[in-house]
Image: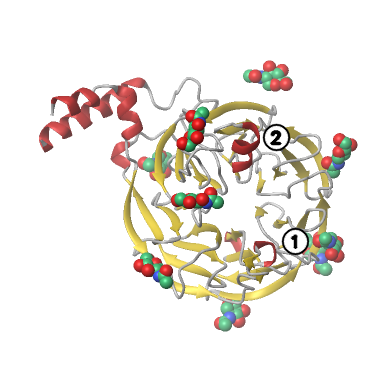
Amino acid sequence: MKLSLFLLLLPVTVLADVSYYHKRTVVPWEPKNATSVDQSVINDGYYYLSDRTNAAVHVVNVATGTLMADITGFIGLNIVNGKPDNGISGPNGLTVVPDHNQLYVGDGDGTVKVVDLGNNTVVASIHTGASTRSDEMAYDSTRQLIAVTNPEETVPVLTIISVANHTVLGNITFPNATNGIEQPAWNPADGYVYVSVPESNANPGGEIDVVDIEQLKIIKILQQPNCNSHGIAFGPYDQLMLGCSQDSIITYGTNHVAILDVSTGNVTATIPGIAGCDQVIYNPTTNFYYVSAYQNTANGTKQGTPDPLLGIIDAATHSLVQTIPTDNITAHSVAVDPKTNTLVVPLANIGIVLYDFDASTTTNDTGTTGTGTGTSGAGRPELVHLLLVAVAAFAAIVNL
Ligand SMILES: *[C@@H]1O[C@H](CO)[C@@H](O)[C@H](O)[C@H]1NC(C)=O
Ligand SMILES: *[C@@H]1O[C@H](CO)[C@@H](O)[C@H](O)[C@H]1NC(C)=O
Ligand SMILES: *[C@@H]1O[C@H](CO)[C@@H](O)[C@H](O)[C@H]1NC(C)=O
Ligand SMILES: *[C@@H]1O[C@H](CO)[C@@H](O)[C@H](O)[C@H]1NC(C)=O
Ligand SMILES: *[C@@H]1O[C@H](CO)[C@@H](O)[C@H](O)[C@H]1NC(C)=O
Ligand SMILES: *[C@@H]1O[C@H](CO)[C@@H](O)[C@H](O)[C@H]1NC(C)=O
Ligand SMILES: *[C@@H]1O[C@H](CO)[C@@H](O)[C@H](O)[C@H]1NC(C)=O
Ligand SMILES: *[C@@H]1O[C@H](CO)[C@@H](O)[C@H](O)[C@H]1NC(C)=O
Ligand SMILES: *[C@@H]1O[C@H](CO)[C@@H](O)[C@H](O)[C@H]1NC(C)=O
């Protein structure tokens, strides 16, 4: 008892132990246990997960933790020479178009499927012109345009689709990309789409290409801090979270994710201790980023033992506030419900896991974070840390 109280009185130690999230329930896989999934999203109380193994998008009711439907009509997992080939498989990336109550989903044959969320049915199939998969997307809600990547083409392509009439309006090629293209993200502040380019001739450590999707032009290139980003997500202000991939661990021995201020092109923070990411997201309600570090290693080196984690980063303080052990198979996907803050991660040997948010363990930073650079920790003064410590210590005394 004395020892645990002593530990509780060390603020830094205790902070790392604050658990915002607790596992609530598991939705079992069906019909088959999934070995290959892709992106996920939560909209209006429902979770949608692309599952290539089952050739479907699963629909889960977040409140009840039950599987409601499987949206079908996708290519599924293609096996070539005995090995799964994600490049010609689907469903893959997805995005909600809320004003039309639709979900756009990239499929394995270069088509984008439009799902009506009223009846969970594919109502249109749009061919991008690519012969390999259509993948990750951004939605420009002002112009009502979808930007979708076709990363496996010989020259990777970003295709622009009109939501109004499902016409392909054109595309942007990335001839300098040497390892495909990854997540695009729309920035409502300037109307541009930011594309994660993990590696290029000029920037082997990765770059973010700023695209004017109306003019179909790359207008600016921002260099990354040796990150080889896969997932990216806008947080508060012009802050772009870069989900540094396994390549950054292998090539540069870096063990971090980074935040890029897209208005200056400056890196405003690197958060050490977590890397190997795919999908990353931001939830304005908690003011947290969630990074799927499924290829993280225990000591941050390429020789390190696999230590797959879901990382939660406070956008105000830029600190890693919680990690949850995951897997290096399907846990490259992450979704969070902005209404309830429930977090969902698919785990290959377990099922779709729902974690609930405990608001009593946090303060509410939203809207009080000043410039968002986080260096001052304005949204969460030390006093609050100490208060949390005191509460935890009190709880420990009561329990013992
Ligand atoms: C689903 O809803 C859409 C839009 O209301 C409609 O066009 C389509 O026919 C419906 N599909 C089925 C199978 O009910
Ligand atoms: C690019 O867009 C045009 C339509 O403007 C389309 O015909 C073509 O197939 C697209 N190419 C690729 C590689 O997606
Ligand atoms: C489709 O809608 C877009 C606007 O989203 C418009 O620019 C384009 O001309 C329309 N194309 C057709 C064939 O109607
Ligand atoms: C490709 O790289 C060359 C040389 O750095 C540059 O001039 C050109 O603008 C780049 N093109 C694109 C589309 O990024
Ligand atoms: C951001 O970058 C600009 C231009 O590279 C530089 O002048 C400025 O000092 C940087 N600001 C910070 C806060 O590092
Ligand atoms: C934080 O505050 C915002 C605005 O008042 C509110 O909408 C949100 O639900 C709060 N979040 C939490 C976790 O209490
Ligand atoms: C990291 O862990 C691996 C496996 O245990 C070990 O071989 C390697 O030396 C470690 N590297 C460092 C820098 O600690
Ligand atoms: C995934 O993790 C397991 C141990 O959990 C390890 O044996 C395997 O090599 C890892 N695979 C990859 C691709 O990192
Ligand atoms: C499927 O996953 C469940 C856990 O959800 C496990 O108990 C079962 O053995 C798995 N089945 C197969 C065929 O791997």
- The quadrant holding residue 21 is top left
Would residue 232 be visible to someone looking at this image? yes
> Residue 33: percent from the left, percent from the top?
45, 69
Q: Could you tell me which residue is drawn at 70 percent across and 29 percent down?
A: 265
The answer to whether 348 appears left or right of 394 in the picture is right
Check disc 1 and report the residue beneath it: 161
Q: Amino acid at mark 1?
A: Ile
The answer to whether 189 appears left or right of 217 in the picture is left
| Residue closest to the eye, 161 or 203 | 203
| Quadrant (top left/top right/bottom left/bottom right) for the C terminus | top left
- The quadrant holding residue 350 is bottom left
| Residue closest to the eye, 103 or 224 | 224
Which type of secondary structure does the marked residue at label 1 adopt?
A: strand
| Residue closest to the eye, 4 or 240 | 4
> Residue 157: percent from the left, percent from the top?
79, 54
The answer to whether 259 appears left or right of 357 in the picture is right
Q: Amino acid at mark 2?
A: Gly
> Residue 389: percent from the left, percent from the top?
25, 27
Q: Which mark is residue 182?
A: none
| Quadrant (top left/top right/bottom left/bottom right) for the N terminus | top left
Q: Image height check: is 148 above or below 68? A: above
Q: Could you tell me which residue is drawn at 17 percent across and 34 percent down?
A: 395
Would residue 313 be visible to someone looking at this image? no
Which type of secondary structure does the marked residue at label 2 adopt?
A: loop
Alpha-carbon span between mark 1 and mark 2: 30 Å
Picture quarter with ligand 9: bottom left
- The quadrant holding residue 170 is bottom right
Check disc 2 and report the residue beneath it: 205
Q: Give the mark nearest the N terminus, 1 or 2.
A: 1
Q: Image height check: is 118 above or below 241? A: below
| Residue closest to the eye, 1 or 101 | 1
In front: label 1 or label 2 = 2
